[in-house]
Amino acid sequence: MGGAAGGRRPCPSRPRCAAHRAARPPAPCQGRCPSIEAGIITTRQDGIATPLGVVRTWPGTDLDGMDAVRCDDQLHAVEPSLEGQLAFLQNRFAVFQVLPLLTVGQVTGPLTEVLDLLWRDSATAVIVTSDPGQALPVGELRRCDGEALQAVVEGRELDAAQACHHVSINAAVQLARRHGLSAELLGHDSSRTGSTRVAGTRTGRVHGFGALVWS
């Protein structure tokens, strides 16, 4: 599975901004969840708890009627892809809401359409998160991750070997291409303090991480 989110930040001049709307009760799921069918997965929960507090979720009524979108609270309950993002957002914005989206299967095209719809609102920031590929020795990892990040900067899509959740990244690449945006690499590194452990033994393999922004 992969992760994407639409986050709305405070915007006093725009009454549509979700930060200024009262929280709504979750919409009914019409009996379609839980499921592991391919699709773009929302949640009915009205908040996501982090060590810094609860982040309120945005109902996502903008997506009503889109065939590829359905809700599944169980998938969201076990998916960690937003954990690292929410803490940064909580430090950056005093008030905001998030619309968490998970991807299952090859849904790059439908996800691009969903992100495009959300992105049209200037109060919305689109954030895409993905684990990198499998843990590798540090030299090999830096080479593989470097090639993947360079591909995204150049507007090329990735495959499953280059990023675990390449579907979400590819949707962002397609969205950027559609709107003439360019990607900038902000940073790239590897986990230096603790290589991956298997049964309590260090494997000498590490995970990589990086960040890009489109503008």
Image (cartoon, rainbow, N blue to C red):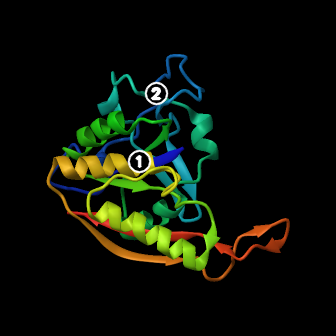
Residue at the spot of label 1: 168
Judge whether 71 appears above or below 167 on screen: above
- Mark 2: few/some/many CA within 10 Å (<14, 14-19, 20+): many
Could you give the CA–CA distance between mark 2 and mark 1, rounded to whole angstroms?
16 Å
Please, what secondary structure does the residue beneath circle 1 have? helix
Q: Is residue 104 left or right of residue 75?
A: left
90 and 209: which is toward the camera: 209
Name the spot of residue 99 as percent of width and height, x first: 40, 44
Q: Most extreme residue toward the bottom, as rendered?
A: 193
In the depicted structure, whether residue 171 falls above or below residue 73:
below
Q: Residue at x 59, y 69 (%)?
A: 207
Q: On the rendered image, what quadrant is the C terminus found in?
A: bottom left
Q: Which kind of residue does numbered mark 1 sit on? A: Ser
Q: Which residue is mark 2?
A: 70
Query: Identity of the amino acid at label 2?
Result: Arg
**Residue 121's spot in the image, x, y percent?**
20, 45
Tell me whether the residue at label 2 lies in contact with that at label 1, contact meaning CB atoms closer than 8 angstroms.
no
Q: Which mark is residue 116?
A: none
Front residue of 179/10: it is 179
For this rendering, which residue is in front, 27 or 38? 38
At x 49%, y 68%, the residue is 144
Determine whether 176 is above or below 22 in the image. below
